[in-house]
Amino acid sequence: MEELDIPQYFLCPISLQIMKDPVTTVTGITYDRESIEMWLYTAEEEVVTATCPVTKQYLPKDVELLTPNHMLRRLIQAWCIVNAERGVDRIPTPKYPMDKSNILRLIRQVNNSNNNSNNDQQVCVNALRKMDDLVSENEKNIKCMEEVGAIKAIIGFILKSYKIGKLLIPGLEEALRIFHSIWNPSHEDHKNHVKDNHDLVKAILWILRNETKNSCHDNVVTGRAMLVLKDVIEASTSNLLSGLDSEFFQETVHALRKNNQQATKAALQVLIAVSTWGRNKLKIIESGAIFELIELELTNPEKRVSELGFCLLANLCVLADGRAKFLEHAAGIALVTKRTLRISASIDDNAIQIFGLICKFSATKEVLLEMLRVGGVSKICMVMQANCEIHLKKKAREILRSHSHIWCNSPCIQILSFDKTIE
């Protein structure tokens, strides 16, 4: 773009960019709405006032006190139109956030879905779509929905859909997206609504189970349902987490087969979160998770999915059943070998943990020779020479020493003769 002489008062004092939605604070200074709202949101939570970036005066954190500067906005828009041929983009008229009374009206319309008339259901669906549009517009709308208790209405709608058994009821996709968008784990009311809500967990599993039978949604609903399940599980009580049944694990593990990175990632996070409670590790193994994890990794997923998958795999290999299932898969040892020292330190840590558990508790001669054949022993030696954490090198040394009599013909095992200590 050709260099222009931009009027100084068109620029936001925070971002130093042309203002798209100028607003004036009580200190008399005009800022771009997005910049000053972010400034106020990021101020210390325990104080009720922030500081004006320009005047250094106290500034209330209530964004309702920001006054739109319509005259300045029109001047900026007119200037942009005049200079359009010189590469200046036109500034659109901003959409202003709705106030609480309008959102409360939408919530009442969602709650009216309890009435079975077609008209009330259509009003409810329209309200959900409007709320979905609002949460995608700006942070203030999300914050406003948090404050007026929209999460309760959304949960009620999901439970209503579950109880009447209509998966394809319009609005369910929007309801799941709204839930995840406005979910705030630090909000006490939000946690109270889900922390021991067994029916909500059952409703999400019902969505996952029925969505599996329906291919027309292209896994979109599955992805959103898994995100909501992740939110719920992270806020749930130990009572709920330790009492999860086999259906929960079957549906969550089944989500790993979906060609949907969002659903896969959320499913892995859910399984990791619940694996520490009760007999959940064994339930996850019995649901076929280890086979699915190895198959998933063979598709070369994105880095974060691999890290989560290896974390869960290491957790499950703590149990004898987990190690047995891991060794049943013909590609298990070769896969861990291939991924070590190639993706991230997190995967290296979990890979060496898996090898350590296998070598300590499940080290038959066939398994040890398989590790030698596919290069696992060489990789463990390379860990000792690589720029890895000290504890990882020590673990690698322990593995090599514990079975050096089997691996003595491997050239790499000679490293033990030259590297006696780990500093």
Image: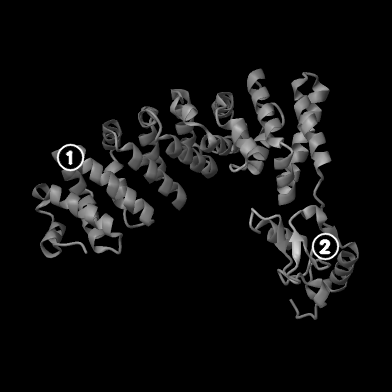
Query: Which picture quadrant has residue 231?
Result: top right
Which element type, helix, strand or loop, lies under badge 1?
loop
Distance from disc 2 to disc 1, alpha carbons, whole Å, reads 72 Å
Residue shown at 83% from the left, 24% from the top: 119
Give the answer, above or below, for where 95 lies relative to 58.
above
Report the residue marked by disc 1.
363
Residue 393 in the image: state x and y as whole percent: 24, 57
How many marks overall?
A: 2
Q: Is residue 94 left or right of residue 284?
A: right
Residue shown at 69% from the left, 59% from the top: 38
Which element type, helix, strand or loop, lies under badge 2?
loop
Residue 161 visible within the image: yes
Q: Are marks 2 and 1 in contact (CB under 8 Å)?
A: no
Q: For mark 1, does the 10 Å Cα neighbourhood hold few (<14), some (14 to 19), or many (20 or more) residues? A: some
Quadrant containing the C terminus is bottom left
Foreground disc of the pair 2, 1: 2
Residue 292 in the image: state x and y as whole percent: 40, 36
Query: Which picture quadrant has residue 392?
Result: bottom left
Residue 42 in the image: state x and y as whole percent: 65, 58
Kind of residue sitting beneath label 1: Ala
Residue 224 bears which disc, if any? Answer: none
The answer to which of 379 and 203 lies nearer the viewer is: 203
Residue 407 in the image: state x and y as whole percent: 12, 50
Q: For mark 2, does the 10 Å Cα neighbourhood hold few (<14), some (14 to 19), or many (20 or more) residues? A: some
Q: Is residue 375 left or right of residue 265?
A: left
Residue shown at 27% from the left, 34% from the top: 328
Query: Reading the chain from its start, which is encountered first: label 2 or label 1?
Result: 2
Residue 218 visible within the image: no
Give the answer, above or below, for where 299 lies relative to 110.
below
Report the residue marked by disc 2.
26
Query: Which picture quadrant has residue 125?
Result: top right
